[in-house]
Image (cartoon, helix red, strand yellow):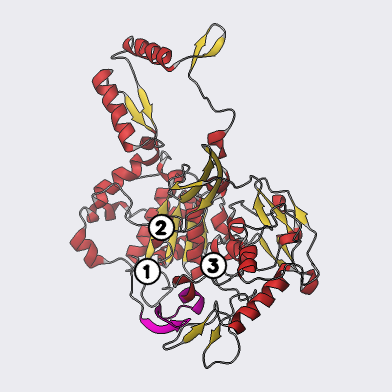
């Protein structure tokens, strides 16, 4: 579904060096791509340009004034100066004014590691040139991070991360002038607000106004994949002496694109928790007692031998494919039985069986990036915001882009706040609703009949099964009003194109439908 197009390149110069930049991008994009350390305190690399801080001012030969690099597009033949005396002096003055918005004595390290402090140092900005005018408000109510307004410069990056990337909108800028401040919706404490604790605001903050409650320290950083759900988000783990101290997002990971949820960012400290087992235990008359690995392995081998031929094993999706293969080999070859099961049989066997018959492969046919390219998303039997939050963020991004959203779920889920249509069916009547939608699509001539004739088998037999699924009959069976069913069928079959090149519809289902006894036909 996703289509790649090559953008035109233009020629320009940056500080006397000839460079190329992509048409339609900004001067800031070109400058950063050239490896130049230009301040951009209100522009997170993954977020939109806000133009609020004015710390990215540059000089353009032949042009009056100092434009903000984050808001100025590149153009052919442009001669950009980032290191001229005029540009540096202007940025230095703005950085000094920005420093005056913070309490420079608030932290023992003086904020030396922050983005603001870094650029203040490189521009030789005076810390105490202006009298500090910081806000004294502090909020410790969130379990995972704290907000200290004495370091807030009102850059808006946290607001943008929450609204434009996660599409939650839990915080915003309240008030105006000297009374302006970061506040949650309704001015509630952060711990009582609609915040999902994903930590995107913390990652975006260029000062120490938003900080994780666990100190981030360590000399070694490793890129890996989050161990929780199956989205496959990229994380960067910082460790010291084998102890995990900090987790950050990985913007290069194509599944998460720099996003994380609360578990991915803050929920991995369990690996070093004091309650974790550090030695094998054997249950005896006095309960579980520590034992050596040799003792435990001898005992397990002895007990297993007593149960050859009358044995069963249950494997886990948290293990690797290789480990699962070895386990089934052990059960069959060593224990002499075929009694082995896997948790995904319950989770995915109905969908895998159906896709094998329909598509020839049990794997899903699309990637997460297709959410953002689709014109319509149809979410069936799933609650992505609770179970796969980063995938839900990408769905909300699609809706923000203009895509339609249909939810089929007996339960009201968070995505219902963003949906065009919520079909609230009786539990177990999913198949009736889907058959009813198919009947409408076929009756109204919305199906691609030539494709069906050329690429499918058994269509006529299936078509005969739809005779009884009129919208009125489906309403009786499922509780979904006939009018909504018809609208959903039309929206899914012929979504309004968001762009000139139609993106089609994307069907997303979850275990709410595949694990139900009547969830699949």
Query: In the rendered view, would you say 230 is above or below 42?
Result: above
Mark 1 or 2, which is nearer the eye?
2
Residue beneath the point at 66% across and 68% down: 155
Front one among 167 and 87: 87
Badge 2 marks a residue whose secondary structure is: loop
Real-space Cα separation, disc 3 to disc 2, in angstroms: 16 Å
Q: Confirm or deny contact between disc 3 and disc 1 (CB under 8 A).
A: no
Front one among 128 and 185: 128
Instruction: First in sequence, mark 3 or 1: give its number.
Output: 3
Instruction: First in sequence, mark 3 or 2: give its number.
Output: 3
Instruction: Identify the magenta region.
Output: 8-30
Badge 3 marks a residue whose secondary structure is: loop
Which residue position is annotated with label 1?
503
Query: In the rendered view, would you say 278 is above or below 260?
Result: above
Label of residue 47 in the image: 3
Q: Position of residue 278 (x, y in %)?
A: 51, 24
Q: Position of residue 271 (x, y in %)?
A: 53, 35
Q: For the residue carrying disc 1, how many other residues have a C-alpha within 10 Å: few (<14), some (14-19), or many (20+)?
A: many
Q: For the residue carrying disc 2, how many other residues have a C-alpha within 10 Å: few (<14), some (14-19), or many (20+)?
A: some
């Amino acid at each position: 579904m996703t289509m790649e197009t090559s953008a035109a390149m233009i020629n320009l110069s940056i500080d006397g060096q000839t460079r190329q930049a992509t048409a339609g991008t900004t001067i800031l994009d070109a400058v950063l791509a050239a490896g130049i350390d230009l301040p951009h305190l209100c522009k997170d690399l993954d977020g939109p340009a806000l133009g609020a801080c004015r710390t990215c001012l540059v000089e353009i030969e032949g042009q009056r004034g100092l434009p903000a690099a984050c808001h100025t597009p590149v153009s052919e033949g442009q001669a950009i100066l980032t290191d001229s005396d005029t540009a540096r002096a202007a940025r230095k003055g703005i950085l000094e004014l920005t420093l005056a918005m913070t309490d420079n004595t608030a932290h023992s390290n003086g904020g030396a590691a922050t983005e603001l402090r870094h650029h203040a140092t490189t521009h030789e900005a005076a810390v105490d040139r202006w009298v500090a005018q910081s806000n004294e408000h502090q909020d410790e109510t969130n379990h995972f991070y704290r907000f200290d307004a004495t370091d807030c410069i009102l850059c808006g990056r946290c607001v943008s991360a929450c609204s434009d990337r996660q599409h939650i909108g839990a915080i915003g800028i309240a008030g105006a002038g000297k009374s302006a401040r970061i506040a949650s919706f309704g001015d509630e404490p952060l711990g009582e607000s609609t915040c999902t604790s994903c930590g995107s605001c913390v990652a975006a903050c260029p000062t120490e106004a938003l900080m994780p409650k666990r100190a981030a320290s360590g000399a070694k950083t490793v890129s890996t994949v989050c161990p929780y759900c199956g989205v496959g988000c990229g994380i960067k783990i910082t460790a010291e002496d084998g102890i995990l101290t900090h987790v950050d997002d990985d913007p290069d990971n194509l599944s998460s694109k720099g996003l994380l949820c609360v578990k991915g960012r803050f929920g991995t400290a369990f690996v070093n928790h004091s309650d974790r087992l550090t030695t094998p235990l054997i249950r005896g008359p006095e309960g579980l007692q520590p034992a050596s690995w040799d003792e435990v392995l001898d005992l397990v081998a002895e007990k297993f031998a007593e149960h050859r031929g009358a044995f069963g094993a249950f494997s886990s999706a948290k293990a690797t494919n290789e480990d699962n293969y070895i386990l089934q080999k052990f059960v069959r070859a060593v224990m002499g039985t075929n009694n082995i099961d896997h948790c995904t049989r319950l989770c995915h066997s109905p969908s895998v069986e159906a896709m094998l018959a329909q598509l020839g492969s049990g794997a899903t046919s699309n990637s997460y990036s297709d959410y953002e390219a689709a014109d319509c998303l149809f979410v069936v039997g799933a609650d992505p915001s609770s179970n796969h939050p980063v995938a839900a963020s990408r769905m909300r991004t699609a809706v923000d882009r203009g895509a339609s959203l249909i939810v089929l779920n007996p339960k009201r889920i968070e995505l219902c706040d963003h949906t065009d249509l919520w079909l609230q069916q009786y539990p177990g009547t999913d198949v009736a609703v889907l058959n009813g939608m198919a009947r409408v699509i076929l009756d109204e001539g919305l199906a691609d009949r030539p494709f069906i004739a050329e690429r499918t088998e058994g269509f006529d037999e299936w078509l005969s099964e739809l005779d009884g699924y009129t919208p009125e009959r489906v309403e009786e069976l499922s509780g979904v009003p006939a009018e909504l069913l018809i609208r959903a069928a039309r929206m899914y079959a012929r979504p309004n194109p968001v762009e000139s090149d139609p993106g089609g519809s994307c069907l997303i289902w979850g275990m709410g439908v595949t694990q139900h006894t009547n969830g699949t036909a």
